[in-house]
Image (tube, grey):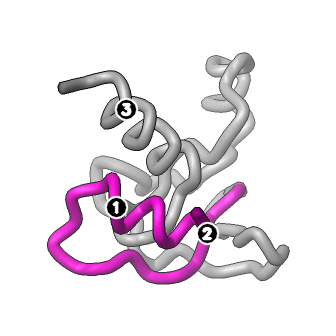
Amino acid sequence: MNLEEKDKKYLGRDVSATPIEIVSSKGSYLYDSQGKEYIDFLMGWNVGNIGWGIEEVESKIKNFDGPTYVLPGFLYKPWADLAETLANITP
């Protein structure tokens, strides 16, 4: 099952995700699984207003390996994997 199919099956969205898989971020930029760079104009105030990958913040969360935030409208493999796992272990 590919990521879009898994996302659609296991995540409760009111609309389909934008078919861009975000894999990393730095400052106000997001990067997809193909290495394409996007300016993140969708970050919400009180969520991402300082940008992503800021050294002072990143130093505090050294053990985390992933984007610090992904807009819920994009595809993000860890969400789909977690949703699948929860669906498989619950009645």
**What distance separates the C-alpha of mark 3 from that of mark 1?**
12 Å
> Which residue sits furthest right?
35
Q: How many residues crowd mark 3 within 10 Å: few (<14), some (14–19), many (20+)?
A: few
Above or below 78: residue 89: above
- Quadrant the N terminus occupies: bottom right
Residue 65 lies left or right of residue 90; in this view the side is right
The stretch drawn in magenta includes residue 11: yes
Amino acid type, mark 2: Glu
Residue 54, how many percent across, how many down? 67, 43
**What distance separates the C-alpha of mark 1 from that of mark 2?**
16 Å
Q: Secondary structure at mark 1?
A: helix
Residue 83, how many percent across, how many down? 38, 41
Q: In which quadrant of the rendered view does residue 11 lie?
A: bottom left
User: Front-most of 5 and 17?
Assistant: 5
- Residue at the spot 29% in from the left edge and 58% down from the top edge: 45
Residue 61, how many percent across, how many down? 64, 21
- Quadrant the C terminus occupies: top left
Span highlighted in magenta in the image: 1-23
Q: Earlier in the sequence, mark 3 or mark 1?
A: 1
Q: In which quadrant of the rendered view does residue 89 lie?
A: top left
Pointer 1: what residue?
9
Pointer 3: what residue?
88
Residue 16, how many percent across, how many down? 31, 79
User: Front-most of 73 and 8?
Assistant: 8
Q: Secondary structure at mark 3?
A: helix
Q: Earlier in the sequence, mark 2 or mark 3?
A: 2
The stretch drawn in magenta includes residue 89: no
Amino acid type, mark 1: Lys
Q: How many marks?
A: 3
| Mark seen at residue 21 | 2
Q: How many residues crowd mark 1 within 10 Å: few (<14), some (14–19), many (20+)?
A: some
Amino acid type, mark 3: Asn
